[in-house]
């Protein structure tokens, strides 16, 4: 079969790997002039490693991704350093990267709250019944079972941070999935995610997969006579699209109305992330990930000192810091200039280190995406678009369909490979 894949993110590349191995003629079309999609990175000339545009790491439970990396023979390039995650309480940062730390977190209070927190955590780790949990919001479920204080200290800041005005609408299966599919140990690829994407793309090219960069596809149409699909005029037997649901709807307006409606009704959050290279280390305590509750008035949700995760030696001695937020599309951060955004952020950096001054900043980069985090509402499983669309030969695999799991490169690989299996079988 002659197959087109739209998008060279990890979903598209994983699908191409399997489809090519199954003997098909595969071409990937990618609108950017690089591979890696949302997990791509960038590099200064004096850096040995790239940094991701949007902070990225793997969990030890990312079996699909780690399995693929093994198949590619690259497992010796994956590292799992031991970074520190902290959470704010009463103006002080507290360790927050193990169950024990969570139980010792002062915001939990004493006695009963700790027991409720422990039991709720245990129940969520043990139960497999996410379908029952998707019938209720995380807000209602946690208020009922964990209690107000535990919810407001531990879970509400996460929900507000990720989902802003939707935070009371997100279903409990989302929190369940996070507790099931995440570990406190965090991993990355030697050289950065972009390095991994480039090596993967090179292996695909060596196998004979065509990767056309700078090839933004405008339309996919059915050719009734030849029973094939036309991708900007080029004919294919099967096509897999890995873009956002909105883009999918624009690319394929011939899709039946109810499938299009399903795509367009899916909600998601965007993200704005500033990366700074600094002359000095920001966190003297060497903390990697600062969870910043929005109600504390910080202008961003997370501050991540990447070079407290991997050494600044890989970046010519620069210290790399991310400040990022999940935002509704249309939020003013999407239209602010990089300099104006920096003006908003600068006062907050001093809260992480009072010695911080503007002179520390060598360079900033701001990356924005409208499609960063799908929003799963109550009963969400019935809203997931089918991978096999109603158009024969046309398939769709995106972050919005990995539910109940939260989006991530691990699940991009899983759904890309699942789509490839369906394409071969059908
Ligand atoms: C802020 C943030 C933090 C994240 N943190 C993590 C993390 O720590 N760990 C983790 O594993 N994951 C993380 N993720 C999620 C991860 O990046 C995604 O789940 C994953 O990269 C999705 O891969 P994909 O292939 O499905 O889609 P994408 O990576 O979005 O790939 C789709 C590709 O399609 C291309 N495309 C779009 N339109 C067209 C067109 N018309 N023609 C041709 N090509 C087109 C795009 O350029 C893109 O390259 C994070 C995401 C964000 C936004």
Image (cartoon, rainbow, N blue to C red):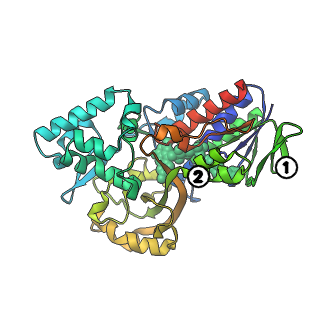
Question: In the rendered image of this protein, does residue 350 appear above or below residue 98?
Answer: below
Question: In the rendered image of this protein, does residue 196 appear above or below residue 334?
Answer: above
Residue 2: x %, y % from top left: 81, 35
Residue 22: x %, y % from top left: 73, 25
Q: Quadrant of the N terminus?
A: top right
Q: Quadrant of the C terminus?
A: top right
Q: Secondary structure at mark 1?
A: loop
Say whether residue 209 is left or right of residue 93: right
Question: In the rendered image of this protein, does residue 278 appear above or below residue 181?
Answer: below
Residue on which the image places disc 1: 233
Q: Which mark is residue 202?
A: none
Q: Secondary structure at mark 2?
A: helix
Q: Residue at x 56, y 33 (%)?
A: 414
Using a 10 Å C-alpha cutoff, classify the residue at mark 2 as few (fewer than 14 neighbours), some (14 to 19) or many (20 or more).
Answer: some
Q: Residue at x 28, y 29 (%)?
A: 123
Task: Tell me if residue 281 can be seen.
Answer: yes
Counting residues from the start of the chain, the first of labels 1 and 2 encountered is 1
Pick out the residue farthest to the front: 257
Say whether residue 199 is left or right of residue 59: right
Residue on which the image places disc 2: 264
Q: Nearer the viewer, residue 13 or 305?
A: 13
Task: Tell me if residue 403 can be seen.
Answer: no
Image quadrant where residue 191 sits = top right
Residue 203: x %, y % from top left: 69, 35
Q: Nearer the viewer, residue 44 or 110?
A: 110
Q: Nearer the viewer, residue 350 or 141?
A: 141
Pick out the residue farthest to the left: 111
Pick out the residue farthest to the right: 225
Q: Residue at x 78, y 30 (%)?
A: 24
Residue 113: x %, y % from top left: 15, 41
Tell me the CA gap for discs 1 and 2.
25 Å
């Amino acid at each position: 079969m002659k197959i087109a894949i739209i998008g060279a993110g990890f979903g598209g590349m994983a699908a191409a790997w399997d489809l090519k191995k199954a003997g098909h003629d595969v071409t990937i079309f990618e609108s950017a002039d690089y591979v890696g999609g949302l997990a791509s990175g960038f590099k200064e000339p004096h850096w040995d490693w790239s940094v991701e545009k949007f902070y990225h790491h793997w969990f030890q439970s990312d079996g699909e991704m780690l399995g693929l990396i093994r198949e590619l023979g690259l497992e010796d390039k994956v590292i799992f350093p031991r970074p520190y995650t902290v959470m704010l309480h009463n103006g002080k940062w507290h360790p927050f990267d193990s169950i024990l730390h969570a139980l010792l977190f002062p915001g939990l209070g004493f006695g009963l709250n700790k027991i409720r927190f422990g039991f709720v955590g245990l129940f969520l780790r043990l139960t497999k019944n996410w379908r029952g949990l998707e019938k209720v919001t995380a807000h209602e479920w946690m208020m009922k079972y964990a209690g107000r204080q535990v919810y407001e200290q531990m879970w509400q800041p996460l929900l507000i941070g990720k989902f802003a005005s939707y935070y009371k609408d997100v279903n409990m299966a989302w929190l369940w999935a996070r507790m099931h599919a995440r570990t406190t140990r965090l991993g990355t690829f030697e050289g950065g995610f972009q390095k991994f994407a480039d090596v993967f793309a090179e292996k695909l090219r060596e196998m004979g997969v065509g990767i056309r960069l700078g090839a933004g596809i405008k339309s996919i149409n059915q050719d009734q006579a030849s029973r094939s699909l036309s991708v900007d005029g080029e004919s294919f037997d099967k096509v897999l699209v890995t873009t956002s649901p909105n883009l999918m709807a624009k690319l394929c307006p011939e899709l039946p109305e109810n499938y299009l409606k399903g795509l367009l009704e899916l909600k998601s959050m965007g993200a704005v992330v500033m990366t700074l290279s600094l002359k000095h280390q920001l966190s003297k305590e060497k903390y990697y990930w600062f969870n910043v509750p929005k109600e504390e008035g910080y202008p961003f949700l997370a501050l991540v000192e990447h070079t407290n995760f991997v050494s600044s030696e890989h970046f010519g001695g620069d210290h790399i810091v991310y400040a990022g937020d999940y935002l509704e599309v249309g939020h003013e951060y999407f239209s602010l200039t990089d300099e104006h955004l920096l003006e908003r952020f600068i006062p907050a950096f001093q809260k992480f280190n009072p010695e911080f001054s503007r002179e520390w900043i060598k360079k900033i980069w701001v990356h924005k995406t409208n499609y960063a985090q799908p929003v799963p509402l109550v009963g969400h499983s019935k809203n997931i678009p089918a991978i096999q669309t109603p158009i024969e030969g046309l398939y769709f695999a995106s972050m919005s369909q990995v539910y109940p799991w939260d989006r991530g490169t691990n699940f991009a690989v899983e759904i890309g490979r699942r789509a490839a299996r369906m394409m071969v079988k059908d």
